[in-house]
Image (spheres, grey):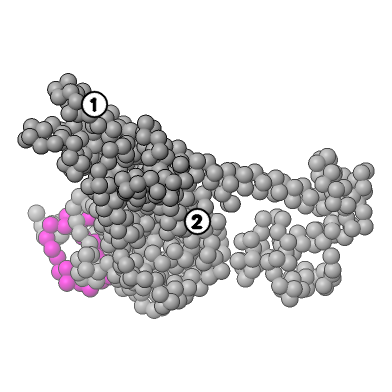
Amino acid sequence: MLWDALSLQLGYNATLVTIGACFLGVAAGVTGTFLFLRKRALVSDAISHATLPGVGLAFMIMVYFGGDGRNLPGLLLGSAISAGLGLLCVSWLTRRTRLAEDAAIGSVLSVFFGFGIVLLTIIQTMSSGRAAGLESFLLGSTAGMLWNDAMVIAGGGAATLVLVLLLRRPMGLVAFDPEFAAASGVDVARIDLAIMGLAMAVTVVGLKIVGLILIVAMLIIPPVTARFWTDRTDRVALISGLCGGVAAWVGAAISAIAPALPTGPIIVLVSFAMFAVSLFLAPNRGVLAAVLRHGRFQRRVHLRQGLLALAQGQPIYESYTLRLLRRAGLALPDGVPTEAGKARAAKALRDEKRWELIRADQSFESAAALYDGLREIETVLTADQIDEIDLRMGGPKGVVA
Amino acid sequence: MSVELASNLGVVPGAEETNNSPLVVRGMTVSYGQKPVVFSVDMTVQEGAMTAIIGPNGAGKSTLLKAALGIVRPLAGHALVFGKSLKHQRHRIAYVPQRASVDWDFPTRVIDVVLMGLYRELGLLRRVRQVHLDKVTACLERVGMVDFADRQIGQLSGGQQQRVFLARALAQGADLYLLDEPFAGVDAATEKAIISVLKGLREEGKTVVAVHHDLSTVHEYFDRVFMINTRKIAEGSVAAAFTSENLDKAYGGRLATGQIDQLALTAS
């Protein structure tokens, strides 16, 4: 069943919704990357909560003029206007008053959201029945979505994506170094506005599927996940888009087979699963890698210290060091070095002296930058260079370990 | 109001407006809140020279640079770059911000940072081609960082970070180089490397202006000084302006008299 949904075999409507959601997920992941890198992730929370009064007012206006209150483009237009107002409030409060950005976000978010809830309540008492479905903007739903709705979402997502790709260079520049960007002639305020505006576009487009409370997760979790896997801006954006797309695809598919479940929370949970996997398993920045790296590092430090102690005839106090030396066949249980241990110890001491010279000499700078107290000197310098160092040290030439 | 006073306040456009100096600042005032950090400052940078902007902490050295570059919006005053307004001359300026002003855990590599120096050339969509990569590599070569091109910037030492910033400014291919504390917190090797690059720029006829903290190296590194403590204190060649009276005026009681005498001695 789930496989049918994932492979788009649950009929026309479900297919449409899944593809629309996927476009939105990619757009959210890529847009969110720049929000995250600019360290403005929380602004998206204010934007999304600020959409609610717009949804309510748009509904009222459309009903007043005798239209269908649930017309999606109309509701999205309303939400965009009120989200834009919320955004202006946040930036005005931050620039013109002494309020810090977090406080500005908190105030705007709660006031707009509160006002929106009041409007929704009024709508419900005013016209019972006709307002059905408006609450789905809170948590998102794909049930009963029309072809037109799906097109609006897919089209909006695709348009946002194109704009982000167009502006990726100045947005990356401003996120990394706004002062340099300004000195290069980039209008920093305008690029910031573009970053926020694009986040707003994603929010508005995604309201129907994900809901305003959780849309934030689609903007933030994918870039945070992607950051675990790479150290390059363009790849963070790419991976983030992929994560967002996959999460939305899977989330929409699950909600297609279980219509009672709200779509937003499911998409968020799928996103979170990817985040959790990355957090633990990512090769460089992941938790597991860090633990293993630390353990390996500690072993090497102990071994090195042990060898240096052996070379200088000092006693070894730490039992862990001794255990490591014994296990490597370098020392006997009483701390006396074996033949192999003596040789390794002598080399360790000699390398230490070589490093000292390398680090003092500017011509070896790039090699010296690799010094961490443990690295084998042969991995950094050629045999000729080591000979040269040994010559300068006045020690015996070309001693083999 | 005398004409002289008026031009000091930046109200009367003086004859300098036609001046082709790389950077002319007139009547610049910048304030954060109600407190002016830079007050009615005039500055004329001499072409082909190395100028140090010196003054105590919080004297407005960095702010003056940022205002001249349009990064900070001044309350009053303006800057002219090679005789024209900044807007049309951006391509002739390179800027090195303070190293501490950015997040070094940002996901980017050394080569990507230097490529940012080509932003004006690349614009929004032009693809990065081999020509651009060659240019960037040459800049990294000049600061001795070519082996680090593929490193993530967070793995660099402070001095190496500073040299990457300098390489990015070199990539901008400008005529006027503005540097904000290029020697702050760097190792001796880096300081040597940076000063030799800057002197190389001077030999090519470029103009260098740097916010500088270490008074003991002013004489060795620079041709001219601009001394500021919110107001302009002095401007001129090191021999003429880097005097004990001026240092006393700029730093007030912050430098011991003995220290000042010693500095002025090395200067003369």
Mark linked to residue A117: 1
Q: What amino acid is at disc 2?
A: Asp
| Residue pictured at 8% horizontal, 32% vertical | A64
Q: Is residue B49 left or right of residue A155?
A: right
Q: Secondary structure at mark 2?
A: loop
Q: Residue furthest left?
A: A65
Magenta residue check for B18: yes
Q: Is residue A159 above or below residue B123?
A: above
Q: Is residue B52 visible?
A: no
| Residue pictured at 28% horizontal, 57% vertical | A163
Q: Quadrant of the C terminus of chain A?
A: bottom right
- Counting residues from the start of the chain, the first of labels 1 and 2 encountered is 1
Quadrant of the rendered structure where residue A111 is? Answer: top left
Q: What residue is pinned by disc 2?
A: A231
Quadrant of the rendered structure where residue B200 is? Answer: bottom left
Please report the bounds of the magenta region as a residue range. B9-35
| Residue pictured at 77% horizontal, 62% vertical | A351
Q: What amino acid is at disc 1?
A: Ile
Total label count? 2
Magenta residue check for A49: no
The chain containing the residue under callout 1 comes to A
Q: Secondary structure at mark 1?
A: helix
Q: Position of residue B78 (x, y in %)?
A: 20, 59
Q: Is residue B23 left or right of residue B240?
A: left
Q: Is residue B6 left or right of residue A390?
A: left
Quadrant of the rendered structure where residue A394 is? Answer: bottom right
Q: Do the numbered discs 1 and 2 sit on residues whose CB atoms are within 8 Å?
A: no
Q: Is residue B14 visible?
A: yes
* Nearer-the-camera pick, A186 or B206: A186
